[in-house]
């Protein structure tokens, strides 16, 4: 028989308990729902029923709250037992203030992953604290885009974090060979990202190769200081590598034989390796029995080299080619040897109709096909390929500008299991073709129809796709409220909607989305000039909304923004550029209620010093664009920048650079602030929708 317990906590904890604990009925108290107004823990002489809950049960509740930091914070404030359980349960830490790191690390002793990627400057002292406090339990640390630490800090990690298996050092531009030598002491390291570490040389990567023999993933993308000597040493010493990214490096033909002989190599990326040529790639004909993914973007290779690669890597599951030689019938015919091939991604490759026909004949079990910006894709070739691969779940024909309704008819009749269809700018496809998509592809979850002749009838048909999660229909000039209302009624699971420059859209269409799509997370309404505050009030009913783009919606004001702040506390990204009527009145509630805001664009608004200072209270805010704020003064800007805590990326007019103290700028940069000075003249907003209307009329008309 169930036991009744009165739960004195916040609603989130109550709901978690009710849903997670079978056989126990939790009732909400009739009085004050949060007795912790003055003290963190109430001194109640009566027995605390929460103390009777086992740690296993508390961990189960925390698992349920794992995606919401605020809910976990509420949970920890209920009582001492909840506070202690939350401390022991947490495994991931992403601190916003490094000055509080010692206190935070003393509380959370079971941390296995630390993310410092949002911190522009991380000192050696911080890394030493981490090594001392959680060293034995730490498995992964992300230091990408961080600076200020040296080989001393990395040496502390190597000495104290013996169990560390993952470390991300991408975009740490000042990483030296001495730092690489410190990394080489991490004997258990399995995954290492060093992308864009341009100071790294063969000596440094050699230390890593000798010391980190257990490496399974290594990214050396944009490591321009490496040569064949260092990369070859990695291939010789790190025999367990499964994923190797050498994109944008100076690797040549010399080290390819050693790489291809890695016994467990599964993924190899050679994007824009301009020193490779067809002679070097011919060595790949020796083949790698384990290779499953090959990403190749080498415009200078020949047909024979690609043919040799295909003939050698017989276990390929995914083949990615970009800017390569024409896909001829000879090359396509060779794909029949790849019995396990499930994904082919071709970008900016020249296709021939015989090549497409051969591709369809050779590959009959594809799950994913991408022909992005491929020249020469015809109705005949594409129709044949899809007819032979009826199990396709993802198809990308973006900018295939010569296909017509014939291709769409073949796709919708053959590939009824499609879950993702991207066909931006297929300008010869008529409005009638889009009706077939909704009629024959009910399993679609992603649909990109940007810049097409889509109309309301097509949207009405697409609304039959009840599982649709992502819909992009920007620049579709024939769409208005009538079609959008159908989407709101028929697609309740929609999470992302792009309506960029939908000039026929008004509040009525957005209201239908707000009412019918409660799971909405992202919406782009930029330059939908008829949108007003009423539309935003409707969107405020979508509690999961985290990305809102309102650029150029000049009818929107503070009232609508306040409604968003009240209803959408998950907002992470907000673009209100050229929303002229938004002032400080809208910034204050936004700053108070939307504590997770990370990125905002305030350009051309009427926000002043007061509004900017209000935003400074948001600890998560990391990126601001504040161009052409006529009410902003140098003193107000300086005060706001000093108030901001932690690293920030701020885009400002170049004119402010001379108005701010150089000492202040230096101080802020030392604290981690990154300035982007823009020399951009003020541009008054014009109603350029007439330009887009004219553009739509100038496009090729298809009946």
Image: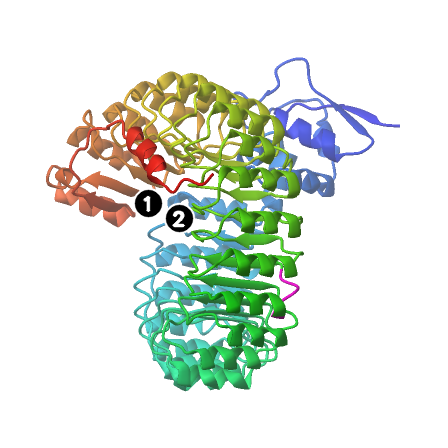
Determine if the magenta segment contains residue 364: yes
- SS class of the residue under badge 2? loop
Q: Residues within 10 Å of mark 1 (few under 14, many from 20)?
A: many
- Which residue appears at 49% of the width and 81% of the height? 259
Q: Is residue 217 visible?
A: yes
Mark 2 = which residue? 118
Residue named by callout 1: 647
Q: Nearer the viewer, residue 199 or 486?
A: 486
Residue 568 % position (x, y): 49, 27
Q: Which residue in the rendered view is the most extreme toward the top?
A: 31
In the rendered image, is residue 616 in sight? no
Residue at image x 44%, y 74%? 184
The quarter of the displayed image where residue 150 is located: bottom left
Image quadrant in which the N terminus is located: top right
In the rendered structure, the answer to whether residue 223 lies left or right of residue 515 reads left
In the rendered structure, which segment of residues is drawn in magenta? 362-366
């Amino acid at each position: 028989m169930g036991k009744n317990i009165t739960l004195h906590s916040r609603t989130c904890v109550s709901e978690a308990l009710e849903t997670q604990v079978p056989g126990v009925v939790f009732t909400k108290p009739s009085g004050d729902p949060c007795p912790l107004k003055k003290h963190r823990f109430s001194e109640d002489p009566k027995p605390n029923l929460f103390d009777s809950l086992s740690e296993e049960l508390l961990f189960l509740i925390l698992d349920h709250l794992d995606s919401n930091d605020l809910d976990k914070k509420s949970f920890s404030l209920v009582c001492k037992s909840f506070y202690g359980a939350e401390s022991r349960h947490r495994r991931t830490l992403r601190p916003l203030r490094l000055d509080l790191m010692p206190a935070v690390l003393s509380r959370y002793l079971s941390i296995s992953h630390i993310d410092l990627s949002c911190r522009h400057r991380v000192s050696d002292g911080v890394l030493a604290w981490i090594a001392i406090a959680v060293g034995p339990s730490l498995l992964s640390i992300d230091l990408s885009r961080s600076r200020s630490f040296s080989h001393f800090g990395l040496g502390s990690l190597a000495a104290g974090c013996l169990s560390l298996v993952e470390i991300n050092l991408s975009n740490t531009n000042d990483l030296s060979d001495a730092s690489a030598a410190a990394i080489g002491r991490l004997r258990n390291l399995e995954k290492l990202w060093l992308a864009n570490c341009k100071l790294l040389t063969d000596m440094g990567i050699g230390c890593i190769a000798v010391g980190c023999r257990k490496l399974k993933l290594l990214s050396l993308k944009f490591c321009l200081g490496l040569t064949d000597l260092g990369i070859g040493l990695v291939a010789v010493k790190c025999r367990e590598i499964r994923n190797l990214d050498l994109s944008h490096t100076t690797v040549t033909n010399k080290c390819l034989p050693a790489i291809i002989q890695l016994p467990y190599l599964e993924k190899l990326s050679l994007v824009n390796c301009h020193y490779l040529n067809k002679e070097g790639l011919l060595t790949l004909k020796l083949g790698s029995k384990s290779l499953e993914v090959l990403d190749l973007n080498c415009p200078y290779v020949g047909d024979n080299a690609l043919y040799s690669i295909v003939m050698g890597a017989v276990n390929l599951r995914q083949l990615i080619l970009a800017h390569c030689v024409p896909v001829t019938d000879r090359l396509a015919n060779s794909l029949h040897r790849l019995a396990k091939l499930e994904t082919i991604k071709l970008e900016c490759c020249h296709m021939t109709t015989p090549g497409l026909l051969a591709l369809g004949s050779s590959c009959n079990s594809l799950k994913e096909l991408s022909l992005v910006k491929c020249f020469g894709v015809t109705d005949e070739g594409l129709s044949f390929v899809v007819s032979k691969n009826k199990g396709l779940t993802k198809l990308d024909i973006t900018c295939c500008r010569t296909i017509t309704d014939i291709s769409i008819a073949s796709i919708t009749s053959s590939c009824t299991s499609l879950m993702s269809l991207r066909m931006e700018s297929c300008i010869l496809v008529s409005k009638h073709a889009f009706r077939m998509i909704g009629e024959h592809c009910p399993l679609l979850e992603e649909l990109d129809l940007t810049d097409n002749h889509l109309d309301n009838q097509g949207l009405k048909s697409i609304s039959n796709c009840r599982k649709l999660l992502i819909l992009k229909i920007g620049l579709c000039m024939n769409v208005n409220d009538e079609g959008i209302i159908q989407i709101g009624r028929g697609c309740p699971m929609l999470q992302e909607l792009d309506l960029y420059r939908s000039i026929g859209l008004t509040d009525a269409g957005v209201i239908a989305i707000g009412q019918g799509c409660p799971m909405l997370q992202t919406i782009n309404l930029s330059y939908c000039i008829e949108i007003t505050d009423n539309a935003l009030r409707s969107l405020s009913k979508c509690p999961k909304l985290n990305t809102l783009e309102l650029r150029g919606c000049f009818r929107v004001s503070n009232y609508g923004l306040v409604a968003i702040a009240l209803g959408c506390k998950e907002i992470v990204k907000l673009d209100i550029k050229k929303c002229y009527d938004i002032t400080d009145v809208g910034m204050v509630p936004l700053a108070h209620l939307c504590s997770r805001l990370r990125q905002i664009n305030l350009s051309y608004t009427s926000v002043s010093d007061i509004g900017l200072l209000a935003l400074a209270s948001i600890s998560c805010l990391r990126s601001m664009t504040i161009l052409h704020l006529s009410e902003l003064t140098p003193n107000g800007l300086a005060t706001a920048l000093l108030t901001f805590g932690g690293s920030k990326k701020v885009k400002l007019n170049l004119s402010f650079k001379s108005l701010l103290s150089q000492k202040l700028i230096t101080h802020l940069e030392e604290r981690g602030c990154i300035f982007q000075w823009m020399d951009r003249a003020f541009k008054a907003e014009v109603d350029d929708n007439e330009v887009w209307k004219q553009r739509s009329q100038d496009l090729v008309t298809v009946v």
